[in-house]
Amino acid sequence: MAAKNIKAIKILGIDTSCDDTAVAIVKIKNQKSKIKNFEILSNVVSSQVKLHAKYGGVYPFLAKREHQKNLPLVFKKALGEAGLLISGVDFIAVTVGPGLEPCLWQGINFAKEIAKKYNKPLISVNHIEAHILANFLSEKPENQQTRKPGTIFPAVCLVVSGGHTQLILMRKIGEYKLIGETRDDAAGECLDKVARILGLGYPGGPAVAKFASLGNLVSKKETKFPINLPRPMMYTKNYDFSFSGLKTAVLYKVRERKYNKSAMAAEVQQAVIDVLIHKTVKTAKDFRVKSIILGGGVVANEELRKQFNWKLEIENWKFNLFVPPLDLCTDNAAMVAVAAFYHRAKRVKNIKAEANLRIS
Ligand code: KG4
Ligand code: ZN
């Protein structure tokens, strides 16, 4: 039976978990149907990259100050781009964690203020879950939640960002089990640190990717200094990761002064990709899932996206592979709005920042 199309709802999401000030408005049609249709009305991200580039990393108190300054402007811009007044928004949603505590509080206090002033319900969102659910926002029909949930779940999610590298088993939306995670540096953090060691630029992930594309043009045989870096914990039986050894291996090579920057960037990127793909596919096989769902800033890496697709093709699998569009991989608030949609019935009285919030 065709689902009735009840009034669409609009959710305004806010994310200030790290160094991006993000506000977005998402419209949800078919809210009562199992098959959802999301439309991004606006998705504004004010990046603090230039500010933190000077220091080669994010300074929480500097980031907090920027959020405070930017939030009213980004909020106004998001409403303007959506062609809405705040009265046209049904819910306010905000990331409460995980993230940098002083930064999270800026978003939370701002969200509380508008929710109170305009009498709107306030929903708290887990940033990791938002990265996963970003997949259901895409324009691509296979990524919109136009599939029946039974054809998607169970799924294994790889969330790979600046602060996290986690493998999460997802039985349905809202039901997660953490299977494995990094024991030290996150994959994005490793790329950021390697970029700093090699002097490639900031933020590190895109900088490594840029140099790697040059490095990949030179075959290992041709280069004067062939580099072979370790793939830490790639073949261990568990589902955990470790990336700090990779960064240390780069540091040793740099001290020996026998390296080429681009070749090094290509090898580091490939080592990270090898480990991420191998462990995710192992988890998918071990737990007999129907889908692999990717999320987080590192998934913006073109080579990682390409090689995940190849791997599934080579293995001739019937898995669904969900990969968010580039702008929904890195931090944004559209993903916060969609996560809030699924938790709109849950009301937390005293919303507070939870820097180390877990998913399960
Ligand atoms: O999800 P995200 O925007 O913020 C966090 O929640 O941490 O992820 C940021 C991370 C950074 O480490 C950044 O270097 C990495 O994602 N990143 C990339 C690319 N774009 C961003 N890593 C590899 N290739 C990229 N194109
Ligand atoms: Zn993130």
Image (cartoon, rainbow, N blue to C red):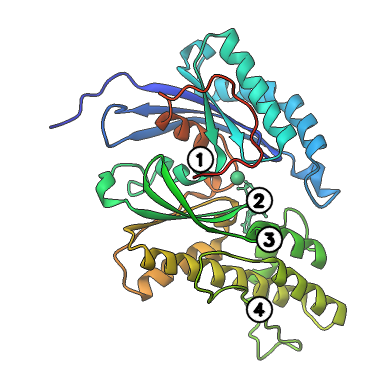
* Residue 300 as seen in the image, left or right of residue 215: left
Asked if ligand 1 lies within 8 A of label 2, the reply is yes
Looking at marks 2 and 3 on the same chain, the residue that comes earlier in the sequence is marked by 2
Numbered disc 1: secondary structure: helix
Asked if ligand 2 lies within 8 A of label 1, the reply is yes
Residues under labels 1 and 4: Cα distance?
32 Å
State the residue position of label 3: 184
State the residue position of label 4: 230
Residue type, label 4:
Pro
Residue density around tag 4, few if under 14, some if 14–19, many if 20 or more, within 10 Å: some
* Residue 26 as seen in the image, left or right of residue 151: right
Residues under labels 4 and 3: Cα distance?
16 Å
Q: Quadrant of residue 48?
A: top right
CB under 8 Å between callouts 1 and 4? no
State the residue position of label 1: 130
Asked if ligand 1 lies within 8 A of label 3, the reply is no
- Front disc: 4 or 3: 3
Task: Examine the rendering and report whether any part of residue 76 can be seen.
Answer: no
Residue density around tag 2, few if under 14, some if 14–19, many if 20 or more, within 10 Å: many
**Residue at position x 55%, y 74% from top?**
234
Residue density around tag 3, few if under 14, some if 14–19, many if 20 or more, within 10 Å: some
Numbered disc 4: secondary structure: loop
